[in-house]
Amino acid sequence: MSHKVDWAKYVADTEKNLSAKIEEVTISNGENLNHGGASNDEEAPDKFSPAEASLLAKVIRKGLVVNKNDIEIQRKDPKSPLYSVKSFEALNLNPNLLKGVYELGFNAPSKIQETALPTLLADPPQNLIAQSQSGTGKTAAFVLAMLSRVDATKKHPQVLCLSPTYELAIQTGEVAAHMAKFCPEIEMKFAVRGEEVGRGAKLSEHIIIGTPGKVLDWSLKYRVFDLKQISVFVLDEADVMIAQQGHQDQCIKIHKNLAEPCQMMFFSATYDQEVMEFAEHIVKNPITIRLKREEESLDNIEQYYVKCGNQQEKYNAVLNIYGTVGVGQAIIFCHTRRTAAWLSEKMSKEGNAVAVLSGDLTVEQRINVLDRFRQGTEKVLITTNVLSRGIDVEQVTIVVNFDLPIDVHGKADCDTYLHRIGRTGRFGKRGIAINLIDSPESMNICQSIERHFNRKIKYLNAEDSDEIEKIGQ
Ligand SMILES: Nc1ncnc2c1ncn2[C@@H]1O[C@H](COP(=O)(O)OP(=O)(O)OP(=O)(O)O)[C@@H](O)[C@H]1O
């Protein structure tokens, strides 16, 4: 399964070509980028096709051309999560892993990578509970630590990484496979729905990446690997894994069956106070990397709300937004599978190419939908909270909360909100989050979220396509 998508490469190549052409054309035609006006088309060094010209306008409008510079500026800003003073070389990684890192196009570590890796690679091993904003490179941080800790001469599972969903486990495995490209001696296995092992089998892979239920079955029920031999235990999205019903019992059971010494690595973009206290209780002498509340939400994601009278008006707002996604892509979050199915059916019937991903699809269907979205086959993905955490599709420019996230008591679920909007604005890119408000209750929830993060959610008139267009500028 490919991790880097062709579509992203297409946009990147197009950007590169267009940037080159902008330079050429600007040199020969002054400010006239599009060869229009008084310039002589025949003398132009390299004429834009109409499709290129329109893509150029969109790319410029969305700020993608300047984005690379933006990232370099963010890297030098001590307040940015991308800020770092060290290079990857300075982190003492194995040279073959370093090659993998550069092959992925990473030039310098982000703040969390630079801070966490020295702790994770220290001897004797240190336990770590780490928090860093969405899209800031936590996965690479713990994957590099996992790969660094493998003793390939021992032919049994020794590193275990748990993810809350099937999609996230697969994504993490793909990142690990890319980083380990030059370490063929390291073997990995997915423990997720759809993967089977024979009864009585003994796994020889060094790294297991999976979801809690399957890992529990394989380790304690079928005994195809021994939790006592695990020396590195990673919990991605650690707060839901130890606090949310469904995952909690399984994760705690796995955790209890680990033997000393086992290095613990807990990562998430959010931990509420209670969950952090619990994490610190179950992890011995941890180093903790914690964000202040005001640092949790990202400056590069602009947040808006749109007032809608009813479901139909929400639908109209989505259509307006759909029309302005441009070169990017959008993810729309609904509260229930039913709403997601209703919305996707209605949009598809009216000729809009949308995909839907919710828990009622088979795992093959789910991964197929996500792959198609990553390749840009559909510009819009409609989903539920199942995709709210961790999923990394770098060209997502807009996240829409068709329904605001609420907890079981109907109160604002601020953590889920942060994870949902974090599907855009990945690694310093710009992103837009739009919340559709259709009742006084949803307005209250929106305001609670605003207060919680102390960050403005601005009003947007979705009747006005021009205004929606403007926010992408
Ligand atoms: N040092 C780096 N240089 C350039 N790009 C990077 C670097 N580290 C990570 N990335 C890219 O940044 C994106 C986000 O990284 P990642 O998915 O690890 O974020 P995260 O912090 O785990 O996010 P989330 O909280 O949503 O799980 C990915 O596309 C990844 O390839």
Image (cartoon, rainbow, N blue to C red):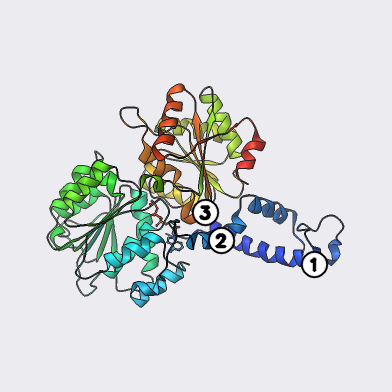
Residue at image location 42% in from the left, 68% down from the top: 85
Q: Is residue 404 above or below residue 222?
A: above
Ligand 1 closer than 8 Å to the CB at disc 3?
no
Q: Which residue occupies the foreground of this view, 81 or 143?
A: 81
Please tell me the numbered disc located at residue 28: 1
Q: Is residue 473 above or below residue 197?
A: above
Residue at image location 46% in from the left, 40% down from the top: 455
Q: Is residue 247 visible?
A: no
Q: Position of residue 17 (x, y in %)?
A: 66, 64
Secondary structure at badge 2 equals helix
Q: Is residue 66 left or right of residue 213?
A: right
Q: Determine which quarter of the picture holds residue 261.
A: bottom left
Q: Earlier in the sequence, mark 3 or mark 1?
A: 1
Q: Residue furthest front?
A: 78
Task: Compute the Cα span from label 2 to label 1.
Answer: 25 Å
Q: Earlier in the sequence, mark 2 or mark 1?
A: 1
Q: Position of residue 139 (x, y in %)?
A: 36, 58
Circle 3 residues within 10 Å: few <14, some 14–19, many ≥20:
many
Q: Which residue occupies the foreground of this view, 458 or 88?
A: 458
Ligand 1 closer than 8 Å to the CB at disc 2?
no
User: What amino acid type should be assigned to the residue bearing mark 1?
Assistant: Ser
Please tell me the numbered disc located at residue 68: 2
Residue at image location 59% in from the left, 55% down from the top: 64
Task: Compute the Cα span from label 3 to label 1.
Answer: 31 Å
Circle 1 residues within 10 Å: few <14, some 14–19, many ≥20:
some
Q: Position of residue 15 (x, y in %)?
A: 62, 60
The image quadrant in which ligand 1 is located: bottom left
Q: Position of residue 172 (x, y in %)?
A: 35, 57
- What residue did someone put label 3 on? 429
Q: Is residue 467 visible?
A: yes
Quadrant the N terminus occupies: bottom left
Q: Is residue 314 above or below residue 388?
A: above
